Image: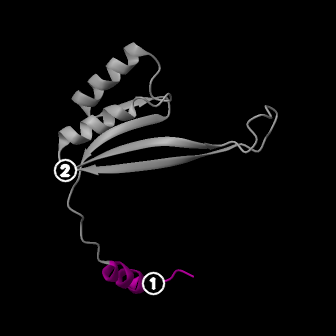
Amino acid sequence: MFAVVKHTCKLDIPDPKNVFSAKSSMKWVHLVWVFEDELQALTYAISLLDDPLLKANDYMYESAINQLQENRFYQLGNESVAIAEIQETPEIIYEEIQEEKEDEESIH
């Protein structure tokens, strides 16, 4: 399985008509879509390039498609799209970590 990951920022502009407003804010958003095969992931990743923050001009658009096909990654400014192969989830054993902390001597 494959995933498409998009790192983008979400703007909150409560009063867009007021150019002097200082109430606007931005936060990072990390989005993931899961696909059965790499071709589906690549197709969807290319469709994300229509976002104005990722598409500067036609030359850059063609370059972005090429980078996604060859490197599985494209970035323009702070925006990025990547194609990742999904791995097995590792088993995380919290009890051992807790026991190690209890065994440590306090220096205070």
**In this picture, residue 52 sits left or right of residue 16:** left
Q: Residue at x 69, y 42 (%)?
A: 13
Q: Is residue 68 left or right of residue 30?
A: left
Q: Position of residue 10 (x, y in %)?
A: 57, 44
> Which quadrant is the C terminus positioned in?
bottom right
Image position, residue 66 (x, y; %): 27, 23
Q: How many marks?
A: 2
Kindly identify which residue carries mark 1: 105
Instruction: Identify residue type, mark 1.
Output: Glu
The x, y position of residue 96, in whole percent, is 31, 81
Q: Which mark is residue 17?
A: none
SS for dot 2: loop
Find the magenta span and give its range: 94-108
At 39% from the left edge and 30% from the top edge, which residue is drawn?
Answer: 49
Dot 2 amino acid type: Glu
User: Residue at (50%, 83%) from the top-left corner?
Assistant: 106
Q: Which numbered disc, 2 or 1, marks the residue that appears first in the sequence?
A: 2
Cβ atoms under marks 2 and 1 closer than 8 Å: no
Identified at 80% across, 35% down, the residue is: 18
Q: Quick one: 91 or 54, which is closer to the camera?
A: 54
Does the magenta run of residues contain 104?
yes
Please identify the dominant SS of the magenta region.
helix
Q: Judge the density around disc 1: few (<14), some (14-19), many (≥20) Cα neighbours within 10 Å.
A: few
- Label of residue 36 in the image: 2
Q: Is residue 66 above or below residue 11?
A: above
